[in-house]
Image: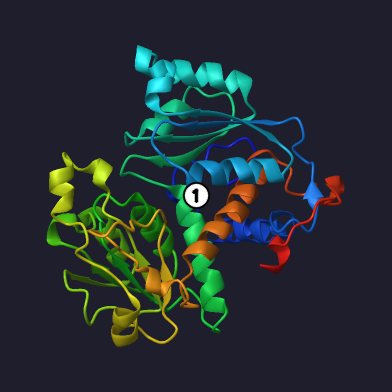
Amino acid sequence: MSFKGEHILSVNQFDRDTIQHVFQIARNMQPYASRQKRTKVLEGAILGNLFFEPSTRTRVSFGCAFNLLGGEVRETTGMESSALSKGESLFDTARVISSYSDVIAMRHPQAGSVAEFALGSRVPVLNGGDGANEHPTQALLDLFTIERELASSGQSIDGMHIAMVGDLKFGRTVHSLSKLLKLYKNLRFTLISPKELAMPDDIVSAIENAGHQVNITDVLEGNLNADIVYQTRIQEERFPSKTEANLYRGKFRLNQEIYTRYCKSNTVIMHPLPRDSRIEANELDNDLNLNPNLAIFRQADNGILVRMALFALTLGVEGIITNYECAVPWYSNKHSG
């Protein structure tokens, strides 16, 4: 994959060498994300940040990543505030918005919509999530986090054991992450969900055909003895009604007591966020907040690095970032946190 001028629509575009290239560029972004330095390499460039589905963290992460490279951000949020609500096609929207932008990040509730949009775009498009289909930048930041967390204890992704928990049917993050993980060697997958929310058969088959071991269960207890536990929320917005979503809400909860009883002492806890902290759900209890193996906020921080890397690569500036460095004149404690 050449990256420059290319769309980032699916994890199927990546192989292990490409992934490691992205990760190396992401690591190079750390001084800028931690405010030790600034770079103006994208000064004057414009990101069209189009989020036609509710989002806070991912939308702001894309915008922040672009700002940290010196670029400017123009946003549209919500379907009702866009011309799509007036019947404009995705193609027409793409033709217009791409004339205003140098790169576009887009989220849309319908599967395949971002790829359809990209057909009309004259600039690179990054998929920020299309329905229950894919979320490639989330999968890359998840994989980056897994690599970093395991490395801190002398492990690697090859040979690891990951437990994926919750809504595996509609959770696009686990779909995309699984497709990336199948590129590695000798993995064990424990897929824990209600039978009605099980991982799609085609993804399970792809994992197994790549030579990995898969255990499918609807029982949480006794199945968390993994290197990584990746918890997901019930994707309420994908269900026909809130009533149906409530049938599964709160079924698989993880707290410190369960962690101590069933997880390894160094099991890393991940979640794509937002975690549902309502009493009826409480997927990851607040009593885990002081657990040093809770990686959910490091995961979000890593998202900035990975998205900065993808912007730099698609706009072809990854090799000249240091040429545009300057000092940070304001007080910041981010580099010490």
The residue sitting at 19% across, 59% down in the picture is 198
Tell me: 178 left or right of 98. left
Quadrant where the C terminus lies? bottom right
Rendering coords of residue 16 (x, y %): 52, 61
| Residue closest to the eye, 175 or 234 | 234
Q: Regarding mark 1 in the picture, which secondary structure is present there? A: helix
| Residue closest to the eye, 295 or 179 | 295
The residue sitting at 41% across, 55% down in the picture is 273
Tell me: 263 left or right of 21. left
The 10 Å Cα crowd at callout 1, few under 14, some 14 to 19, many 20 or more, is many
Q: Residue furthest front?
A: 279
Q: Quadrant of residue 196?
A: bottom left
- The residue under label 1 is 137
Tell me, yes or no, if residue 209 can be seen here.
yes
Rendering coords of residue 272 (x, y %): 42, 57
In this rendering, the answer to whether 207 lies above or below 307 is below
In this rendering, the answer to whether 192 lies above or below 266 is above
| Residue closest to the eye, 138 or 202 | 138
Tell me: 248 left or right of 313. left
Rendering coords of residue 329 (x, y %): 85, 50
Rendering coords of residue 140 (x, y %): 50, 56
The residue sitting at 39% across, 38% down in the picture is 54
Tell me, yes or no, if residue 3 can be seen here.
no
Tell me: 195 left or right of 262. left
The residue sitting at 38% across, 46% down in the picture is 134
Disc 1 residue type (three-letter): Thr
Q: Quadrant of residue 256?
A: bottom left
In this rendering, the answer to whether 3 lies above or below 259 is above
